[in-house]
Image (cartoon, rainbow, N blue to C red):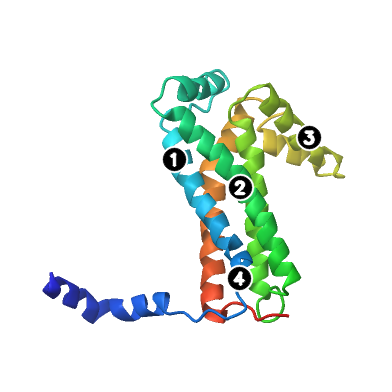
C-alpha cells in the first residue's frame, strides 16, 4: 500500500493538499453563526441523496405523478421516511440559507474583496427558491397544480415578452405535461448542476480569501 501511496504522492502531492484542507486558519471571532453556510450545504447533500433515491420510483407524467408519490409513501420500504426527510431538509435548507445571508450581511462579509463570493451566494439563494417552486409541483396534486399555475402566470404582466415567457415556462398555453416535464428537468438536473457550480466557486473563493474579519 505504501508504494501505491508514494506513487500518487509523487505526482499529486496528496499530503500537501490534505495539510492545506485540515490546517486552515480560523479567526478567533468566529462563532456558531458562521456554521450556517455549512449547515445549508449539509441540507443540500441530504436533498441530493434523498431526491436521487426517489427518482427510482417517481414518474414525471400527469397521469402517474401523484400515484407514484403515493406508492413511495405507502409501498416502498422506508419511502415515507426518505420523502419526509427530503421535505424537512428542504425547509431547513431555506431557513439556514436565509439566516446565513442575514449573518453575512450584518457582519459585512459582502464587502471588498468578497463581492464575488456574495454574488455567488445570491445566485445560490435564487437556485434554492427555484428548487422549492419546481419541487412543489412534482406530486401534481391540487396544491401543486394551482401553485404552478399562479407562479407561471406571474410573468404574463411583463410588457411585450410576458406571454412568451409564460408559454416557455408552461411548455404550452396551459399547465400540463409540458410544464411537469420542464419543472422535473429543472428540479433534478439543471438546478442541482448550477448549484454545484456556484457552490464550488463560492468555496474556492472562501478558501482563497478566508473568513471576513469582525466589524
> Mark 2 packing: few (<14 Cα in 10 Å), some, or many (20+)?
some
Q: Which residue is mark 4?
A: 31
Q: Are the residues flagged by discs 2 and 4 in contact, CB closer than 8 Å?
A: no
Residue 92: give its label. Answer: 2
Q: Say above or below: 144 vs 212.
A: above
Element class at badge 3 = helix
- Residue 192: percent from the left, percent from the top? 53, 50
- At x 51%, y 72%, the residue is 204
From the viewer's perspective, is the residue at label 3 or at label 4 nearer? 4
- At x 69%, y 58%, the residue is 99
Q: Say above or below: 78 vs 202.
A: above
Q: Between residues 132 and 41, which one lies in front from this camera angle?
A: 41
Of marks 1 and 4, which one's residue comes earlier in the chain?
4
Quick check: 75 left or right of 165?
Answer: left
Q: CA distance from mark 1 to mark 2?
A: 18 Å
Q: Are the residues flagged by discs 1 and 2 in contact, CB closer than 8 Å?
A: no
Of marks 2 and 3, which one's residue comes earlier in the chain?
2
Q: CA distance from mark 3 to mark 4?
A: 43 Å
- Residue 5: percent from the left, percent from the top? 18, 73
Q: Say above or below: 39 vs 179.
A: below
Element class at badge 2 = helix
From the viewer's perspective, is the residue at label 2 or at label 4 nearer? 4
Q: CA distance from mark 2 to mark 3?
A: 28 Å
From the viewer's perspective, is the residue at label 1 or at label 4 nearer? 4
Q: Between residues 210 and 191, which one lies in front from this camera angle?
A: 210
Q: Which residue is mark 1?
A: 52
- Residue 117: percent from the left, percent from the top? 63, 71
Q: Which residue is mark 3?
A: 153
Amino acid at each position: 500500500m505504501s508504494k501505491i501511496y508514494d506513487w500518487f504522492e509523487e505526482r499529486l502531492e496528496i499530503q500537501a493538499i490534505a495539510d492545506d484542507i485540515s490546517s486552515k486558519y480560523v479567526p478567533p471571532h468566529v462563532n456558531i453563526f458562521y456554521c450556517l453556510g455549512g449547515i445549508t450545504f449539509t441540507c443540500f447533500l441530504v436533498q441530493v441523496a434523498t431526491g436521487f433515491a426517489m427518482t427510482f420510483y417517481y414518474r414525471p407524467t400527469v397521469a402517474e405523478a401523484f400515484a407514484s408519490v403515493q406508492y413511495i409513501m405507502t409501498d416502498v420500504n422506508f419511502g415515507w421516511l426518505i420523502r419526509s426527510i427530503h421535505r424537512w431538509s428542504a425547509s431547513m435548507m431555506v431557513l439556514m440559507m436565509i439566516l446565513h445571508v442575514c449573518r453575512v450581511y450584518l457582519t459585512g462579509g459582502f464587502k471588498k474583496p468578497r463581492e464575488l463570493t456574495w454574488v455567488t451566494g445570491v445566485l445560490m439563494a435564487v437556485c434554492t427558491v427555484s428548487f422549492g417552486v419546481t419541487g412543489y409541483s412534482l406530486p401534481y396534486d391540487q396544491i401543486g397544480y394551482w401553485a404552478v399555475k399562479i407562479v407561471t402566470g406571474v410573468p404574463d404582466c411583463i410588457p411585450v415578452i410576458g406571454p412568451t415567457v409564460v408559454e416557455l415556462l408552461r411548455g404550452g398555453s396551459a399547465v400540463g405535461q409540458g410544464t411537469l416535464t420542464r419543472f422535473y428537468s429543472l428540479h433534478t438536473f439543471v438546478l442541482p448542476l448550477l448549484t454545484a457550480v456556484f457552490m464550488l466557486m463560492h468555496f474556492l473563493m472562501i478558501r482563497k480569501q478566508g473568513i471576513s474579519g469582525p466589524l
